[in-house]
Image (cartoon, rainbow, N blue to C red):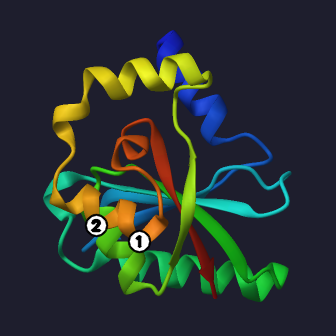
Amino acid sequence: MLSEDDNFLWNEATADYRFYCVVEWHGTPVGYVSIHDTRVGVWELGIELDREYCYKGLGPKSIKLFLQAIEEITLISLYRARVEVDNLACQKCMAKIGAELVGLCDGPFKTAEEKKQFEDEHIDRIDDHMRGLAIQLSVEPRELLSHVLEYEIQV
């Protein structure tokens, strides 16, 4: 029997507006690729792989196959992805599939006060990578601490 947490996750994963595909490596499930919500205008892509299977080329290959299959069925060719600023593996994956970094979007913090407080408390986490992203996006580096990177993916 599923625990309450497992049942919640199962219900979320199997909701009519979500679409998940399992990623396998030689017959072993190692992660998933998904569309979070088909009810919105531009569908958001999600991917998660077990850490030991990262940096093997599975991410870009899985995303490309997944999106090509969806495009054949739906004719939808524009997607978005949100990536944490410190998730370098996923940022590299986005670059490999030709995704375009288009800006920042809200992370877990909703109010300006929450964002500022988190930025103030974590200002020491700003590194050269974040400074480069800030220049690319024309934002202050501290903004990256409280936001998520947004990419557009064109199939």
Residue lying at the far top of the rendered structure: 4
Instruction: Tell me the CA gap for discs 1 and 2.
Output: 6 Å
- Per the rendering, the mark at residue 136 is 1
Q: Is residue 34 left or right of residue 126?
A: right
Q: Is residue 36 left or right of residue 4?
A: right
Dot 2 amino acid type: Gly
Q: Looking at the figure, which quarter contains the C terminus?
A: bottom right
Against 98, is 12 above or below? above
Q: Position of residue 98 (x, y in %)?
A: 47, 87
Judge by depth and name the residue closer to the eye, 42 or 29.
42
**Crowding at mark 1 (Cα within 10 Å: few <14, some 14-19, many 20+):** few
Judge by depth and name the residue closer to the eye, 11 or 143.
143
Q: Position of residue 144 (x, y in %)?
A: 40, 46
**Picture residue at 48% right of the left edge, 26% below the top:** 115
- Per the rendering, the mark at residue 18 is none
Dot 1 amino acid type: Gln
**Picture residue at 67% right of the left edge, 41% below the top:** 14
Against 108, is 36 above or below? below
Residue 141 in sight here: yes
Q: Is residue 13 left or right of residue 116?
A: right
**Picture residue at 27% right of the left edge, 56% below the top:** 130
Q: Is residue 116 left or right of residue 120?
A: right
Hey, which quadrant is residue 27 in on the image?
Answer: bottom left
Against 5, is 106 above or below? below
| Pointer 1 with pointer 2, Cβ within 8 A | yes
Q: Which residue is mark 2?
A: 132
Q: Position of residue 109 (x, y in %)?
A: 53, 26
- Label 1's element? helix
